[in-house]
Amino acid sequence: MITLTVANKLETQQLTHNSGPLELGRGPARSGSARVVVRDAFVSRDHIHIEELPGRKVKVLNLSTKAPITVDNHAVLNPGAECDYLLPVRLAVGETVVDVDSGDSEPVSVNVLKTIAAPARAGSGTQPALIDRSEAAKPEEIVGWLETVVNVQKAGERDAFYKQAADALVSHIGLDTGIVLLKERDAWRVVAQVVKDDNQPARAFSHALLAQALTGKRTFYVGAAAAGGGESLVGVQGVVVSPFFDSRDNVIGVIYGNRMQRARGREIGPLEAQVVQLLATAVGAGLQRLEQDDEANRLRVAKDAAEEADRTKSGFLAMVSHELRTPLTTIIGYSEMLLEQAAMDNLPQYTADLQQVHSAGQHLLALINDILDFSKIEAGKLEIANDPYAPASLIGDLILSVEPLAKKNNNRIEVDCPPDLGRAMGDPTRIRQCVLNLVGNACKFTKDGTVTVTARREPVAGVDSVRVSVSDTGIGMSPEQIGRLFQAFTQVDSSAGRKFGGTGLGLAISQKLCAAMGGQITVASELGKGSTFTMTIKAML
């Protein structure tokens, strides 16, 4: 096991590597090797390869093709070269310094390692009231510490969390160094560091203490660090380290502080450790809040982008549909004029071709109208009229218009519509469009069969309503196909779509139109035995 400290102007990382090769560079990991990503423009994509050897040695290979590695501030390892070094060893590349040492060089004696109770979490029981606690600390000191914690939680960004927490260790607890480290796989990255005396060299971190906080998930402190051994604790009087957690109770970082040795210097005690633990809790809670805010912002941005895309799409469809309808109307109009002229001039040889042009134009115009309606519905710009109409007359006129479609597949249309359905208020154009779509579909998917149209006026859930049912003896549908029935641009069966044609918009539009008129369309069907579509709308909008 080896330990590494990677430091440059942008970051400081500390990590423990257990076994196997380890590579450092700007690029991502290569297969078969662990990787430390270094943020340094002067470091190559793949630069340093390190392997631990017996006898406290490491093999170092320079993977770069251009930049050398400086070893212990004097030796040079050229590109492509490799060499064995006795630990500890310092490697320098670009603006980055990498200190490599043996992982067993920093023991911490259990005699000096102390801990405090972990904070109470949700569902873990109640704590004794504050009034029952000791009065050893002055009230103003306790309030000052709590204000520090509140200020940390009020910070609006992660860097502010880290900086205020590190500063609190120095300015409010009285330590000489305050550090916040984040856990990144096997590495510890310094994200904030505050030193009381800028001229005082900062000591390395205790990997053993970091490992204790990571595995124990609680706060540890050392009152007499020098007695515990370890190079990073030499000259240090006291150390405290407290983890903070994510929403899944995983350690994502630690707050680390130490105090240098001095005459009659007060050691770090349980009260200081408790406040550090409170700071760590504040940082963890604040990071979770920021994560939730980021997720909420991400979802809001995605929602806004989706809505803007829908508006753009709807606007484009509306514009294109409008532009296409103008020349199509002209084509249909001229084809009708030519049909009349051919009949007047007794030119039957042209009638079939002109009728084909006219039918194709009508079909294309119907598709464009569907797309235009769908774009209006999606954009929320659909307008429903509220005019008087006679349901019986509307159904009768509509059946006459679909007779040619029924005859095309040799179908018979039966109508069950009492003449006394009275008067209603609504949008007769949209009602006619919905019923026509249902009858047209029934005729299209039925061959040599019967299509039955039934109309009734009756209360539905206490509301005066008009109910129109369209039944057929056609191909029917399975439950899975019914589940996809009202989805836009979707055919219940791709093979049926190729055989019978259509865009898959008719039923989706009809369902939305019925909903806008206070009703709905329901369906009952059995594969191979036909279908029944029932449209129900309010009689008075």
Image (cartoon, grey):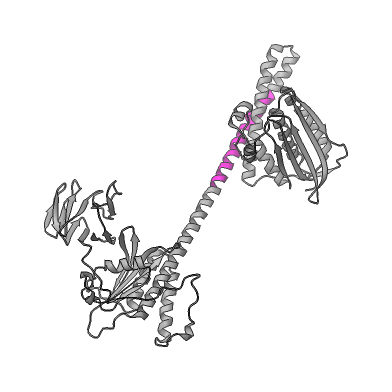
What percent of the width, then of the height, locates residue 523? 71, 39
Front residue of 259/352: it is: 259
Q: Is residue 176 magenta?
A: no
Residue at the spot x=68%, y=23% of the render?
358
Left/right placement of residue 28 relative to residue 317 reads: left
Choose top left, top right, bottom left or bottom right for residue 192. Answer: bottom left
Total numbered labels: 0
Q: Is residue 415 visible?
A: yes
Residue at the spot x=64%, y=47% of the render?
380
What percent of the width, then of the height, locates residue 174? 32, 79
**Up-down relation of residue 425 to residue 96 (above or below):** above
Q: Is residue 318 magenta?
A: yes
Front residue of 430/121: it is: 121
What's the magenta bit mostly, secondary-structure-wise?
helix
**Up-down relation of residue 539 to residue 256 (above or below):** above
Question: Magenta segment range?
Answer: 308-334
Q: Is residue 156 visible?
A: no
- Pick out the residue farthest to the left: 75
* Quarter the N terminus occupies: bottom left
Front residue of 364/262: it is: 262
